[in-house]
Amino acid sequence: MEFSLEDFRNTGIDPTSNSKWNLTDYYELCCKSEFHGCAIITSINKKNVSDSIKALVNILHRNCIEGEGWSQNKISIDQLFSFYLSSGYLSKSKAIQITRDDFLKSYHEIIDGMHEYENYEIKKNGKVIQKFSHFENETIFASYSIDNSWNNRQYLIETENNWIFFDWGTGV
């Protein structure tokens, strides 16, 4: 799966008026470990988008709003796509399909290590919650690895009900 500027343009999404990013859920799984840091998991229900590229645009739009403190973008889809790549919100413009088990192994390598710290916390849309269970409660149809390096991991996951973007990078 490749993510090109043309793909993003073809979604017809205008970042200056797009409001579907409001339909995403934004999870922060964080601890104060330099290595584990925070994982950001953003999801959008498949009822709200027609395909993976539209899901990704809305998810990344939400991540930029949360991460950069933007209230609404005043830039074009071309500028937004370039920003995603240059700032690391999308570390590469190509993803390879991986098995469900490979994704879950990588996910648990990161998340399970966070539980060892007393200050481990999970937030959903800014509010503390007790548990994150998207991957345990839904059937994973497809897993795409955008980045799977030791210090940065990004995945786009298709489940029965959602598109989910997993983004983690070490603080080291």
Image: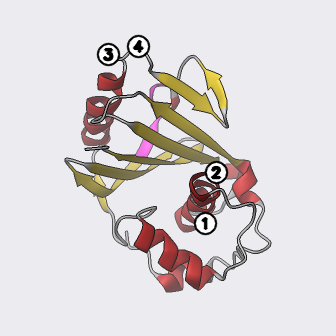
Colour theme: secondary structure
Residue mark closest to the camera, 3 vs 4: 4
Q: Residues within 10 Å of mark 1 (few under 14, many from 20)?
A: many
- Mark identifier at residue 54: 1
- Mark 3 to mark 1: distance in Å? 36 Å
Q: Residues within 10 Å of mark 3 (few under 14, many from 20)?
A: few
Residue 20 placement (x, y as % from top left):
74, 59
Q: Is residue 27 left or right of residue 73?
A: left
- Mark 4 to mark 2: distance in Å? 35 Å
- Residue 139 highlighted magenta (yes or no): yes
Q: Earlier in the sequence, mark 3 or mark 1?
A: 1
Which residue is label 2 attached to?
46
Quarter of the image where the C terminus is located: top left
- Mark identifier at residue 118: 4
The magenta span reads 135-141
- Mark identifier at residue 116: 3
In front here: 48 or 150?
Answer: 150
Residue lying at 33% horizontally and 29% vertically, measured from the top left: 33
Q: Helix, strand, or loop for circle 2?
A: helix
The amino acid beneath tag 2 is Lys
Residue mark closest to the camera, 1 vs 2: 1
Residue mark closest to the camera, 4 vs 2: 4
Residues at marks 4 and 1 touching, judged by CB atoms closer than 8 Å: no
Q: Helix, strand, or loop for circle 1?
A: helix
